Image: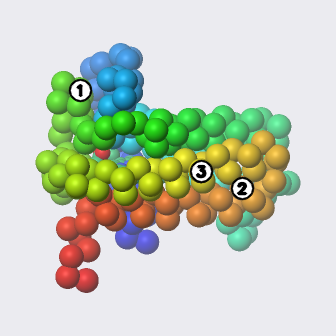
Amino acid sequence: MRHTMLIASAGAALLAACAAAPDASDQPQASAAGDTYYLRAGMIEEINPPMEAIWNMQVEVMDDFGNFDPALMTPQTWADLQGHAQGLAAATQRMATAGTYVAANPDGPYTDAPVGTDLAAIQQRLDRDKAAYRALSQNTARHAEQLLAAARAQDAAQVTQLVNDMQPQCKACHDVFWYPEEYQGQ
Ligand code: HEC
């Protein structure tokens, strides 16, 4: 629950940041340097938007149990879902296949750390545990591929399961690489 709130508030901050960004129409920052993945830009520009769109859809088309309700889905909402799932699969795949992980591009728009965190500490963890970061990225990319397949098959039950299981994927990495300080001593 606490994590949901963190993601929600990060999302709100993100909307504000986007609105304020003077160069929002420039090249995406995440993949600006080829094999180097700038992960703060990746989260803000590529990974969070399709995920948030899917979570928002879930609220619009869910039944009383929070499941994607096939009766509420239309050709348009299936197409929207497929588009978001495809965006998420592509974004997570880019992260999973990058050669180097850099917390933020020093010349890009995202050099300020998310509230309560420290980009230098995040970078230290990335440098120390790059293989673990890549493995978590690969898991998330595989999960997104499965979600895309379920969306294409218009399998609402499978979509529900995979969407519900996606947040633990995000959280697994955030717990270790974003804000582990929060968990110390617990
Ligand atoms: C393999 C690791 C990893 C995975 C998987 C991951 N993230 Fe992240 N994410 C991070 C790290 C590290 C940060 C903190 C540093 C930063 O902001 O870039 C972060 C930050 C964020 C932020 C805050 C961005 C900001 O700077 O304001 C959002 C929003 C976010 N992630 C969303 C998601 C969502 C949604 C998912 C799942 C679909 C996800 N992340 C999956 C590593 C990951």
Few, some or many C-alpha atoms within 10 Å of disc 3 (few <14, some 14-19, many ≥20)?
A: some
Please state the horizontal and vertical placement of residue 118, each as a whole percent of the image: 16, 52
| Label 3: which secondary element | helix
Residue type, mark 1 in image: Gly
Pick whichever of labels 1 and 2 is earlier in the sequence: 1
| Residue closer to the observer: 110 or 58 | 110
Q: Residue furthest right?
A: 71
- What color scheme is it? rainbow
Tell me if residue 97 comes above or below residue 167 in the rendering: above
Looking at mark 2, is its residue's CB closer than 8 Å to ligand 1? no
Identified at 70% across, 39% down, the residue is 82
Considering the image in quadrants, where does the C terminus appear? bottom left
Determine which residue is flagged by label 1.
108
Q: Which mark is residue 142?
A: 3
Is residue 98 toward the left or the right of residue 123 in the image? Answer: right
Looking at mark 1, is its residue's CB closer than 8 Å to ligand 1? no
Determine which residue is flagged by label 2.
159
